[in-house]
Amino acid sequence: MKKSYLLLVAILVGALVLVSAARAEETPTTTPNSGVRDAVKKVVAPIKTQIKDIRTNAKTEIKDVRRDAKSAIEAERELIKKRTETAKEDIKARTEELKVRKEEFQDKVREEKKQLEERIKEKRTELKERLEKIKDERKKQVVERIDKSMDELNARMVKHFTEVLDKVEGVLNRVSERTEKAKAAGADVSVVVAAIDQAVNAIREARAAIEAQAGKTYTINVTDEATLKNRVGEARQSLRADLKVVQDAVKAAHEAVRKVAVALGQIIRPSPSPKVSPSPTPLPTESPSPTPVQ
C-alpha cells in the first residue's frame, strides 16, 4: 500500500515536469493554452489508468489482509479452545489424583492405627518388665504415665495435622476450579498450573509424613534408676523432633497452596495476595506434664 502511494506521487511529479517542458517548447504561433492542454492530456491519461490500477490493487490487498486476519483470529480461537480443554483435563487430573491419594491415605492410617494398638500393648508390657529394676514405686508410675501421654499426644497431633491438610487440600480444589474458569475465559494460567503441580507434590509429601507418624510409638529405654530421667527425656525429645518434621511438611503444603491462590489472584485482579486458612497450629511448647522423674 505504501509503495503504491509513493509510486503515484512519483508519477504526478513526472507529470508536472513534462508540463513544464511542454510550456518551454511552445512556439509563438502555437496557442499557449491548447499546447498545455494537449501536453496535460497526454500525461494525465496514463496517470488515470495507473491510479485506477493502484486502487484496484489496493482493494485486493485490503481484502487479502482482512481474509488473513480473519483466518488468524479463527486459528487463535481454536488454539485457545484446545488449550482450555487441555487445561481442564490437566487440572482435573491433578485434583483427582489428590482425591485418590487421600482415600489411600485414610485406609493406610486406619491400618497403621490397628497395628499400632498392638505394638503399644506389647511396648507397655515390656516397659513394666524393665521397670522392675526400679525400686521407687512413684518413679515407676510417673514413667508409665509419661509413656502413655506420649502415645496420646502423637495420636492427637496426627489427627490435627490430618484435619489441617484436608482443609488445605479443599482450598486447592476451589482454587483449581477458579483456574479452570479463568482459562476458559482466555487467561494465560500457565503460572498457576505450575504452582498447582508444586502444591499437589507438597500435599502428597505431607500425607506421607503423617502416614509414617501415625504408625510410630516411642519407647523409654529403662536401664537403671540413675539414668531413668535422661531416658525419659530422650524419648520425649524424639517424639517432638518427629512431630516437627510432620508440622514442617504440612506448613510447606499450606504455603504451596497459598502461592497458587496468589498466582491466580494476580491474573484475575492484581491486588494484595489472598490468604489461605487455616495454618497448622504450632506444636505445644510442652507435652503433657506428668510429675517429673527425680
Image (cartoon, rainbow, N blue to C red):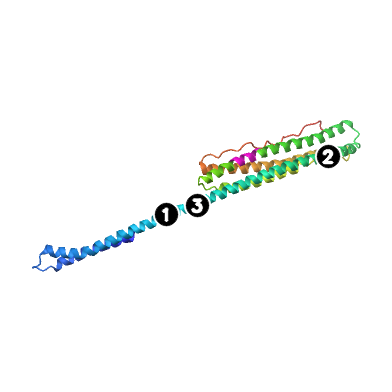
Secondary structure at numbered mark 3: helix
Decide: is 125 above or below 37.
above
- Cβ atoms under marks 1 and 3 closer than 8 Å: no
Q: Residues within 10 Å of mark 3 (few under 14, many from 20)?
A: few
- Cβ atoms under marks 3 and 2 closer than 8 Å: no
Q: Is residue 145 left or right of residue 27?
A: right
Label at residue 78: 3
Residue drawn at x 67%, y 41% is 250
- The residue type indicated by label 1 comes to Ala
Secondary structure at numbered mark 2: helix
Q: Is residue 234 left or right of residue 83?
A: right
Q: Which portion, as a residue range, is magenta?
A: 167-174
- The residue type indicated by label 3 comes to Glu
Q: Position of residue 48 (x, y in %)?
A: 24, 61
* Position of the N terminus by quadrant: bottom left
Ranked by sequence position, the earlier of labels 1 and 3 is 1
Decide: is 27 above or below 55.
below
Residue of label 1: 69
- Mark 3–mark 2 Cα distance, whole angstroms, equals 61 Å
* Residue 168 is one of the magenta-drawn residues: yes
